[in-house]
Structure formats: structure tokens, C-alpha cells
Image: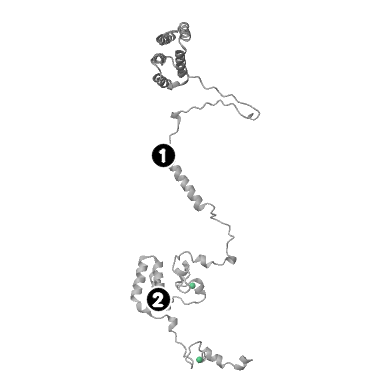
């Protein structure tokens, strides 16, 4: 049984002999340690060898922890075992390639010869700009799918109304882009507005409805003629509403000034009753009624005159 200090000394000598290449003498020293050290110290040597063999870069740290937990005699052995400057580099053996474990159930399993390693320098850094661009692209796609997904921009014309009739409800939804017909208030076409200059749509014109009769040469005159027509043909409240709509519709600053000035100058014409109300009414019936008076008789009196016999029969 030899002194533990001798063990530490022998380990130091083994290190020197290995560096010098005298492996024969080194082996002799090693077998001396194996045979002459007690089981406790031999276990310490084996633990150190195991740590150095398996722990790789963390071996020194593990040895230090082992040293701290050991008694002074073991500490000397551990200190002698610790790697020193000039020691040959210890290479850990490559992990074994797993063999395919073929059984009746895993006959498809292929042998794996790919080793997994992590190379931090080859890792791709997260690019914040690219991430932002990606997020924006996703947002655009999501919005498109939410708002336009499944929308057919050119559907088959199967929903066309029967006989191509105008859907008045749908046609009334968009605002007018020009001035309306003075009689039926549909939007005037370009030709009706600029060439005929009677303030009427084609249909009203063709049916001979009353329009502007005053000849006009420019847009301002036509606008004044329209205002005069409205004041003449409508009662005050309706006339003011229509004139306000004309003002809203024209958009042009000078045209609006024209309308405002005309309305200010022609307040009396606007306040006057509509022309249709100024017709001379036929004289009332003898009973005082004015309902459908014809040949001096109102509708009720005419019915009284018809034969009561026929009514009784
Ligand atoms: Zn019309
Ligand atoms: Zn009468």
C-alpha cells in the first residue's frame, strides 16, 4: 500500500514520460498505481479519468467541483490529473452511427448517417426590415381576401331586368352629375343640356312639355333662364328648394354667384304663385261649388240632373 502523495507524483511522472514518448515506462508507472494504491485512491483516479474522457470542454469545471468535494489526499491526486499546458489535445470519439434496427414492423427504416451539429456562425439573423415587409404583405393579402375575395367584377349578365327596363331605384342611388330636367328632374344628357337649351330631357321635349323658350347664347344666360323658369312654374317653397338644388349642383363658383345674384334680385318673382295657379278659373256652379264645373254645373249638380229613373231601374 503506497502513499497517496506517491500517486500524485507518479501521475506527474507519467505526464512527463508521455510527452517524451517513453510509453513503456509510463505504462509501468500506471500499473504500479493500479496495483499499489488503495481502492479509495484508485476510485479517485478512475473518476478523474472518466471525467477527462467524457466531459470534453467542461472537464476542468467538473474536476474542480470534484476537488472541492474531496479530502486533502484525494485533492492531491485530482490536482495531478488536471490537464496542463502542453498536454496533447484530447479528442472525443465521434458518436456512433446508429444501425438500422430492422424488425418485422420497422422494415422501412433507413440507416441514418446524418450527424446533427449546430454552427452559430451559419445561423441566419432575423432581419427586422424583412419581417416588417412580410407582415405588410400578409396584411394586404388578408385585406384583399376579406374585402374582395370571391367578388366577380364581370359577372354574367343574368341579372339584367326583363326587357332591359330601367331600374329606377338603382338609378336614383348615384348623385346627378349635371343639371336635372326642369319638368321631370331626371339627369339631362350632354346634348340636351348644351344643344337644345330648353332645360328638358328628351322624353319631355318629345312630348311637348313646356320648357325654356327664351333664346340663350351662353351658360350663364341658360342658368338665369332656368332660375326664371323655376320661379315661374313653382310656388315659393318649391321654387326655393329647386333653386337651392341648382346652386348645389353647378359646383362652379361663378355660376353659383350668378344664381345667388338672380335670387336676390328676383325675390318677388319667386314669391309669386306658380303660373298654373294663375289661370282663370271657370265661374262656380250655382250651388257655390267649383268641382269640375262644366256648362255652369258642378259634378254633383250634373249627377242630380241625370235621369233618376235610370238609377232606380
Ligand atoms: Zn323631363
Ligand atoms: Zn253645383
Q: Are marks 1 and 2 in contact (CB under 8 Å)?
A: no
Query: x, y (%) of residue 191?
Result: 47, 68
Which residue carries the number 1 mark? 128
Left or right, residue 263 beside residue 197: left
Q: In front of the other: label 1 or label 2?
A: 1
Q: Secondary structure at mark 2?
A: helix
Q: Quadrant of the C terminus?
A: bottom right
Instruction: Left or right? Give the position of 84 relative to 167.
Output: left
Left or right: 214 as drawn, with respect to 158 = left
Quadrant of the rendered structure where residue 241 is? bottom left
Instruction: Please tell me how crowded label 2 is: few (under 14), some (14-19), or many (20+) other residues with Cα within 10 Å.
Output: few
**156 left or right of 64?**
right
At a point 50% along the width and 74% down the height, the residue shown is 204
Residue 262 in picture, x, y percent from top left:
35, 73
Mark 1 or mark 2, earlier in chain: 1
Q: Position of residue 123 (x, y in %)?
A: 45, 31
Please name the residue shown 56% across and 90% down the image: 303
Q: Can the viewer see residue 217?
A: no
Q: Which residue is mark 2?
A: 237
Amino acid at each position: 500500500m503506497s502513499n497517496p502523495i506517491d500517486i500524485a507524483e507518479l501521475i506527474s511522472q507519467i505526464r512527463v514520460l508521455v510527452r517524451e514518448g517513453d510509453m513503456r515506462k509510463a505504462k509501468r508507472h500506471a500499473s504500479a498505481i493500479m496495483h499499489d494504491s488503495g481502492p479509495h485512491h484508485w476510485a479517485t483516479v478512475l473518476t478523474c479519468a472518466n471525467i477527462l474522457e467524457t466531459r470534453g470542454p467542461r472537464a476542468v469545471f467538473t474536476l474542480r467541483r470534484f476537488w472541492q468535494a474531496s479530502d486533502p489526499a484525494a485533492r492531491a491526486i485530482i490536482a495531478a490529473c488536471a490537464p496542463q499546458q502542453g498536454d496533447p489535445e484530447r479528442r472525443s470519439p465521434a458518436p456512433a452511427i446508429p444501425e438500422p434496427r430492422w424488425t418485422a414492423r420497422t422494415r422501412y427504416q433507413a440507416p441514418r448517417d446524418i450527424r446533427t451539429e449546430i454552427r452559430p456562425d451559419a445561423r441566419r439573423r432575423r432581419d427586422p426590415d424583412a419581417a416588417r415587409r412580410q407582415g405588410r404583405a400578409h396584411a394586404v393579402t388578408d385585406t384583399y381576401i376579406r374585402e374582395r375575395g370571391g367578388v366577380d367584377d364581370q359577372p354574367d349578365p343574368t341579372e339584367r331586368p326583363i326587357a332591359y327596363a330601367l331600374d329606377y331605384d338603382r338609378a336614383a342611388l348615384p348623385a346627378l352629375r349635371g343639371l336635372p330636367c326642369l319638368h321631370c328632374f331626371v339627369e339631362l344628357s350632354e346634348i340636351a343640356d348644351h344643344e337644345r337649351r330648353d332645360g328638358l330631357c328628351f322624353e319631355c321635349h318629345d312630348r311637348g312639355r313646356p320648357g325654356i323658350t327664351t333664346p340663350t347664347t351662353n351658360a350663364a344666360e341658360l342658368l338665369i333662364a332656368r332660375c326664371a323658369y323655376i320661379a315661374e312654374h313653382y310656388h315659393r317653397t318649391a321654387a326655393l328648394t329647386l333653386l337651392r338644388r341648382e346652386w348645389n349642383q353647378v359646383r362652379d363658383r361663378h355660376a353659383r354667384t350668378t344664381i345667388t345674384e338672380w335670387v336676390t334680385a328676383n325675390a318677388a318673382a319667386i314669391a309669386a304663385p306658380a303660373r298654373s295657379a294663375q289661370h282663370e278659373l271657370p265661374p262656380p256652379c250655382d250651388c257655390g261649388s267649383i268641382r269640375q264645373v262644366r256648362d255652369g254645373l258642378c259634378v254633383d249638380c250634373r249627377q242630380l240632373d241625370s235621369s233618376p229613373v235610370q238609377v232606380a231601374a
